[in-house]
Image: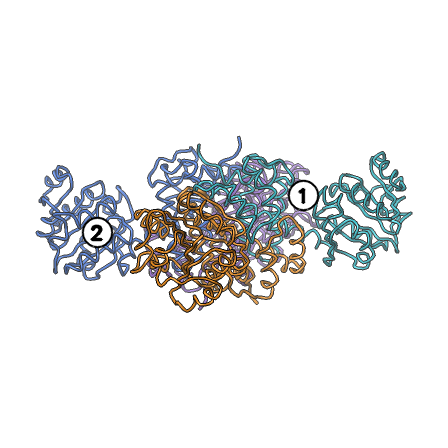
Chain colours: A blue, B purple, C orange, D cyan
Amino acid sequence: MEVGFLGLGIMGKAMATNLIKSGFKVTVWNRTLSKCNELVELGASIGETPAAVVKKCKLIIAMLSDPAATLLVVFDKDGVLEEICSGKGYIDMSTVDPETSTKISQAITAKGGSFLEAPVSGSKQPAEAGQLVILAAGHKALYDLAIPAFDVMGKKSFFLGEIGNGAKMKLVVNMIMGSMMNAFSEGLVLAERSGLNPSNLLDVLDLGGIANPMFRGKGPGMLKGNHSPAFPLKHQQKDMRLALALGDENAVSMPVAAAANEAFKKARSMGLGDLDFSAVYEIVKMQKD
Amino acid sequence: MEVGFLGLGIMGKAMATNLIKSGFKVTVWNRTLSKCNELVELGASIGETPAAVVKKCKLIIAMLSDPAATLLVVFDKDGVLEEICSGKGYIDMSTVDPETSTKISQAITAKGGSFLEAPVSGSKQPAEAGQLVILAAGHKALYDLAIPAFDVMGKKSFFLGEIGNGAKMKLVVNMIMGSMMNAFSEGLVLAERSGLNPSNLLDVLDLGGIANPMFRGKGPGMLKGNHSPAFPLKHQQKDMRLALALGDENAVSMPVAAAANEAFKKARSMGLGDLDFSAVYEIVKMQKD
Amino acid sequence: MEVGFLGLGIMGKAMATNLIKSGFKVTVWNRTLSKCNELVELGASIGETPAAVVKKCKLIIAMLSDPAATLLVVFDKDGVLEEICSGKGYIDMSTVDPETSTKISQAITAKGGSFLEAPVSGSKQPAEAGQLVILAAGHKALYDLAIPAFDVMGKKSFFLGEIGNGAKMKLVVNMIMGSMMNAFSEGLVLAERSGLNPSNLLDVLDLGGIANPMFRGKGPGMLKGNHSPAFPLKHQQKDMRLALALGDENAVSMPVAAAANEAFKKARSMGLGDLDFSAVYEIVKMQKD
Amino acid sequence: MEVGFLGLGIMGKAMATNLIKSGFKVTVWNRTLSKCNELVELGASIGETPAAVVKKCKLIIAMLSDPAATLLVVFDKDGVLEEICSGKGYIDMSTVDPETSTKISQAITAKGGSFLEAPVSGSKQPAEAGQLVILAAGHKALYDLAIPAFDVMGKKSFFLGEIGNGAKMKLVVNMIMGSMMNAFSEGLVLAERSGLNPSNLLDVLDLGGIANPMFRGKGPGMLKGNHSPAFPLKHQQKDMRLALALGDENAVSMPVAAAANEAFKKARSMGLGDLDFSAVYEIVKMQKD
């Protein structure tokens, strides 16, 4: 299958590489075209503009850094919209808000094209290993068509229904994650202050029913005060806020998430927003010397 | 090594069996003596009373149902206290409160014996498989002596310091678990009400950084309204309360655990106390028809 | 002073009446013009359109039902904007969001007029008694000019600075009020369930340091399950949400307001949104029969 | 009526003085007897010991500093218990826990005497002005007998039923007060950070439906960082904890009180426990400089 790929950042480059290595014919485009060279050496073609890529391919995948970039690639001069048409499918795998996603979806479908939002769970390493989790929503037929590509880029893909559901699923997962991080931090501090060794707590947790990669991966660093940002606290707090807003729309009362959100807000107010979201631990720990 | 074993309930029987099969010489006692027969067939001796078992063995392990039973076995006529003395070690692996544990510890040590509280994490299956997690505290020398027995009964044992720390460690773990169950429930309900398939959420969670046996094991049943009690909600709420009280003593603010505790209390007031603690999900879900 | 008055609903009629009775020359307009008759009998003139009122008066006050109505009165054909100009001041006393207020402010000032948002605290009775609390923001000179009119309509007026501050002040007050209603409800239920007479609690509260008109006014009805809407719960919850959003913008952690908001959301999900916000009491009280 | 009065601290002295001035014949006792002199000048008699006072009077009132003192006065040599008997009534107006109260009640009634716990709401000033609020529980007949004395010492007295209810009522009131103080603090900080003048907020609040003496009295000081202790934060937090424990017993979920309690705990951990409970404001306000 001929696949177009727009955006060769850390994630996009890894994903496109996997497609090429699995035998897909890939035409790549990147705002800074020089970044395409490495992919060309692996066998990719270059498209001069997003429009050129769309003209050439029936299936186009985009992986861009933020909502602004996703909108530019579609709506700008020489953008996707100029060449999209019936028979062509556009898959945006960037992480964007539902409004952005809906806006792109409407523009694509108005021109006869089909559209899928497909944000992923997982960062650089899973992208390189083809182990992403893909949360797709939009045109089911396009999803079915894209499965071979998804199988290469991810360990699992989901079709979640209508546009917006991919973004919603990410919010729900991140909300649970944020509450868990607070629960974990409270436990670590409680252990420490009541005379237990928090390292022992890490070991005990890892042997039981709530053992999970996040506790295992972040716990030891947290105890040393290491919160170098994998997922910045301010972004985690934004996702908590958006998840709570989603709950508000649907009259879902979520007191634990609300309490966690306020803790993240306190962390922001104490200047920890750019650290990893595990830095909420410092707020729980904070006491008079 | 000659080991005495007091209490052959579901847990005790499995643990004693593992000791025998691993070559320990075991003398067993149980309130209903007939329950000893099965162990005798495997090679165990019988002690007529706790005192008789203590007289015969240097290392005695108890696994009883509740604090009342643990006190009786020690302080009653023909109890442990009558024969315990210097050179003998008593290990109580039952789950009891720190007060009970302290009372027993003081009585044993007053007679010259050494003592270890060693509550376990894990239920029937891990007990049978020798996969318990053992949270020991008290006399370090006794712990060192007991390691071969712990290695047979558990996959891992910890020495946590002074008496009471075993119970505290269990509280901290259960507190984190209770908050996580609330976070999980909120996520499931939010998914459902915002148009996502909560089964998909289970799958997505299980592929990510917060995947854990509890979500995996309980999630599908929860969605069907199945909350048959593995760990009753009223006990989970009691542990949350005790953990919060421990936090109060040590001036640890734990807003997420506090919010979770109030949700469990609401569940209790709605008559769900005897169901599994996953029934807090029903409280989050509750809405006008 | 010649004053224009747009909007003769329950509030507007009472306020305009007070102005007339205090000797102001008032020109009134209302979408349904027949509502003006009563005011005419008291001495008011009629303006056929908002524009006509603005043409005739230098000071124009509007008291309309919602943001949509406030926008129409300004921007529609024959609206305020057609005649507003330098030397004329427009005061919107309706309760609207900051965006609406800002939009109107910009349009008025672009034409050379001056503008004040001046939402009030207090409903029908205080309006009739001239006992409103007026939260004004915008052009200070216009505020100074309007003081005689404010003195007639309210017991106190505040100038709060830039546009938006009137709305913000209302949000902050309503947030405190919402948390207090939850605290009050929790206390009433706790009293009842622990064997106290909640009516006694009302009496004790009313004699102490936290005695306030809301507890006094709503308490007895709440105990009887009477929650006929003075301020609907869904609006109270909306204000909690907006106040929390304001806190989010400014990184203010407000865990008590967040917990109260979740309780109001639960009340909404149980179908109590159209009752008075005191109906959150029913959520706290809810238990298995 | 002949009345005995035990304990002439700040509160007791004021209360006994009011009784004398209203025509009661009062026999006083105090651990440091010299403190009785002032009362003797007003017309009081002196009792050498609590027992001597009980022997002389049919109605005895105690106002002591803490549970330990109340127990000593009753159970110690020359204590109340030596002379209490049928036909005599003992009223303890000290603030004590239900256990202490129950212990005293049982001892008094075993000797044939009747007993009332009657903690008060109000401190020095209301005591001097005879404006206390009296929360009595125990023997109704004794309450009826004591009404003339209560009418002199307080502006209002309540009979709340069985022993323990006086203490419970105080807990419920203090719980509501603690949540309100948090709500107030959150509002003040939100106002400040969103560009409003918090002094204006104080004024607006004082004109509306939630105006109350606590906001009015403590607000201005709080804004200046003045938290000199009228009611120490650590005692307020203890009362929140006890109220939450009472809720736990009765399966009452109180998420707002729970969130407030955690904020007070954080204040304790930051070293603010000896300041007034209004110091929780400093926790809400805390941010990176």
Tell me the chain of label 2: A
The percent position of residue D71, horizontal first and vertical second, equals 78, 44
In the visual, does B77 lie left or right of D241? right
The percent position of residue A277, horizontal first and vertical second, equals 38, 41
Amino acid under label 1? Glu
The percent position of residue A185, horizontal first and vertical second, equals 45, 41
Of A94 and B81, the residue lying toward us: A94
Tell me the chain of label 1: B
Of A118 and D234, the residue lying toward us: D234
Of C252 and D66, the residue lying toward us: C252
The percent position of residue C166, horizontal first and vertical second, equals 44, 48
Badge 1 local density, few (<14 within 10 Å), some, or many (20+)?
some
Residue B118 appears in the figure? yes
Q: In this view, does A275 lie above or below A20?
A: above
| Separation of residues labelled 2 and 1 (CA atoms) | 75 Å
Amino acid under label 2? Asp
Report helix, strand or loop for mark 2.
strand
Q: In this view, does A286 lie above or below C225?
A: above
In the visual, does A130 lie left or right of D74? left
Quarter of the image with the N terminus of chain A is: bottom left
Q: Is residue C13 above or below residue C90?
A: below
Name the mark nearer the viewer: 2 or 1: 2
The residue that disc 2 covers is A92
Indicate which disc residue C39 carries: none
The residue that disc 1 covers is B83
